[in-house]
Amino acid sequence: MSNISGIMDLSANSNILRSDPMLTEMEKMLIRGAGSMVHYPKGHVIFAAGDISDRVYLLESGWVKIYRLSADGRRVTVGSIRNPGELMGLAEAILGVERTCFAGAINNVSMVVMTKSKFEELMAQHPFLAIKVAKLLGARMREAEAIIHEMVCWQAPGRLALMLMKMGERMGEQTKNGIKINLQLTHEEIANMVGTSRQTVTSLLNTFKQEKSIVFEGRTIRIVNPDKLAKWVV
């Protein structure tokens, strides 16, 4: 994970960047032993709204976005992008209700898939894993509350700047020239994540570039001045 101490100093009183409880290697091995490895290509829908939630997933490589469809058919990203090492599909599987969201592969992904019954059996056998899952769901609930607050109280520049900082923390690579975000998203995809239009995202990214907060390298974004970018998050 990248070293972005400048970003982490944003707030002394609140966790502005998410810090999910991470699975240990032993916990991952338990899950791998209870499931089977599958591979999905970029763009594949792993699960869809209305599906029976009878599977839990451990993402091994690649990134997955969780989204809903708006009334006009737009894909509105909800929650966070799921990173390698994260569990997916937990809440609805545990509740035993239908899926309300879609999960789409942003790039080629590999994941361990296990049945709900096998996962519940695993948690019963290993209470420390059940505690980790409870902590993870708690962290995601807190983040969902924070996202609602951001959408209501913050303007688009602050939401976009924060999203870039979160991506730098979760999937960034520290280099001598800044933090390279190792995930290529279209401006439309970014707009769906921060609740604004593609045109607004393009304009704001150009503003960040002009003030030398970020630079573009093809479709890749590099954060070169996190302190300047953080000033938009107010």
Image: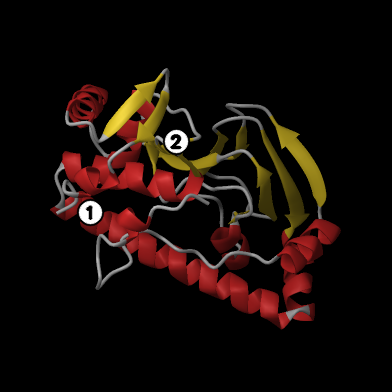
Mark 1 residue type? Glu
- Kind of residue indicated by mark 2: Lys
Residue 150: mark in rendering = 1
Nearer to me, 229 or 98: 229
For residue 79, above or below residue 203: below
Identify the element where label 1 is drawn.
Answer: helix
**In the image, residue 16 lies at what x, y percent?**
31, 61
Residue 219, quarter of picture:
top left
Q: Measuring 20% from the left and 44% from the top, which residue is drawn there?
A: 228
Residue at point 56% right, 48% down?
Answer: 83
Relative to the observer, which residue lies in front, 178 or 60? 178
Q: Secondary structure at mark 2?
A: strand
Residue closest to the far bottom: 127
Please tell me in which quadrant of the rendered image residue 38 appears.
top right
Which one is nearer the viewer's eye here, 34 or 181?
181
Mark 2 lies on residue: 180
- Residue at 27%, 24% (x, y): give it: 198
Residue 225 placed where, x, y %? Answer: 27, 41
Of all residues, the one furthest to the top in this rendering is 218
